[in-house]
Amino acid sequence: MHTKLHVLNSIQPSTATQKKTMFPYSNSRLEGLNQCPVWGTVSAQKRYDTQARSMALEAGETMHQVYAAVRIWQLANIQGLPQHAKVVANRIFGKERWEKCNTGLAAGDDREILLQICFEVLHSSEWFDDPSDDVRTMANMELSAIKYVDERLPYMENWPIYVESNKNPRCMVGIEQVFDVVLEYDDGKEIRYIGTIDGLVQKASAKKWYLDENKTAARLDAGWRAKWDLYHQITGYCASSTSVFGFPVFNSRVTGAKVKPTGKGEDIIAVEPLARTPEQIYRWASWLRSTAETFEKYKDNYAWEHADRYTHSCNRYFRPCALIPFCNDTEEGRRIAFDTQMVDADPSPSERAVMEM
């Protein structure tokens, strides 16, 4: 006999009480738990105090600032809403930094001015090159920004960014929009889910709303394209956006950009349309619940000792997992390390965004 999955009843914006009392699950936290329950449970709470950088994560966050700047420029110059753009820019970059990025620009056409803004965003970020990584460098990210602008600029009028009200600059705008929602299931179980959508745009020819996501990658091959057809993050973001914005958002496109453009083949690829169905949302909600329940089961009182170790993930992303020494220790040694040798884990980008709301 098959076990019936719990049915999702609703997705609603989190209340003030729920925000104070419920653990926020981001997609990255959930994926970490899937990669290995021990790693996902421990790393959500503690980490070793190390100066090692996550170059892929840093580069991705830096390039996402560029993508946000491009959308802000579109809002001001293509959609004719400079005050809306200013409010969004100050929210994302801070007033002082945005003024430095958006003033003192040399004369030029739209492309030249937009590229100047992108370069100022890059150079005013916290990024600095690491001699051990010749892929993720400032020079390569500048080239990637050029490729991205050249790809997006000609089609901006075809993909207007969502604006709740043209008359109110402080309204909800589909740029780096944070969501914080609660899923309720048929048995009353509630789970809090958070994230940030890169963009919400309308495909002008079809009059349909699209989730507009950006991803950085080392390569953009057939495997990279295919993963988005079922990817839970896209499904969850569509479902959550539908709740937050108040209208159906069941389509999406994902734009991939190589951090190190090769000039050979496609350095920028847009994958669309990616339609989501009720069945996919049902299965995403089931996955979210079962993964969150793994964390709930093992997070307290050293219960991670009883969690399964997924040793196939010890070489995640082609480098040794930081918790190999931890898992390879004795039970007593792990408790000592957790209590005295490790520091509180850093919040994920989505968790930081929610805390800043």
Image (tube, rainbow, N blue to C red):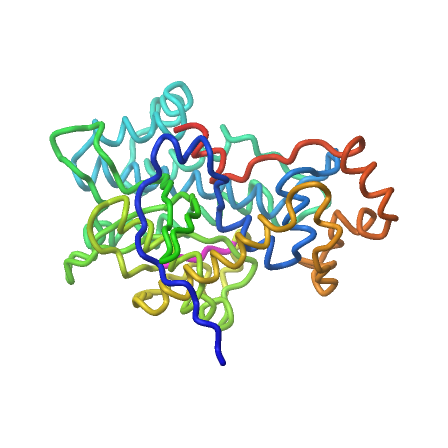
In the image: residue 79, left or right of residue 278: left
x 72%, y 65%: residue: 312
Residue 96 image offset from top left, x and y in percent: 40, 18
Residue 257: in magenta span: yes
Q: Residue furthest top?
A: 96
Nearest to the observer: residue 100 or residue 167: 167
Q: Residue at x 42, y 23 (%)?
A: 97
Q: Which residues are magenta?
A: 254-258
Residue sticking out furthest to the bottom: 1
- Considering depth in this image, is 296 or 341 the residue closer to the camera? 296
Q: Position of residue 147 (x, y in %)?
A: 42, 52
- Residue 85 in picture, x, y percent from top left: 26, 31
Residue pictured at 41% horizontal, 37% vertical? 118
Looking at the rendering, in which quadrant would you find the C terminus? Answer: top left
**Side (left or right) of 36 relative to 3:** right
Q: Is residue 276 above or below residue 31?
A: below
Residue in front for this viewpoint, 304 or 146 = 304
Number of marks drawn = 0
Above or below, 70 against 1 in this view is above
Q: Report the front residue among 71 and 281.
A: 281
Q: Which secondary structure type mostly characterizes the magenta part of the structure?
A: strand
How far across and how far down the image is residue 51, in percent?
Answer: 73, 34
Q: Residue at x 48, y 73 (%)?
A: 3
Q: Is residue 276 above or below residue 260?
A: below
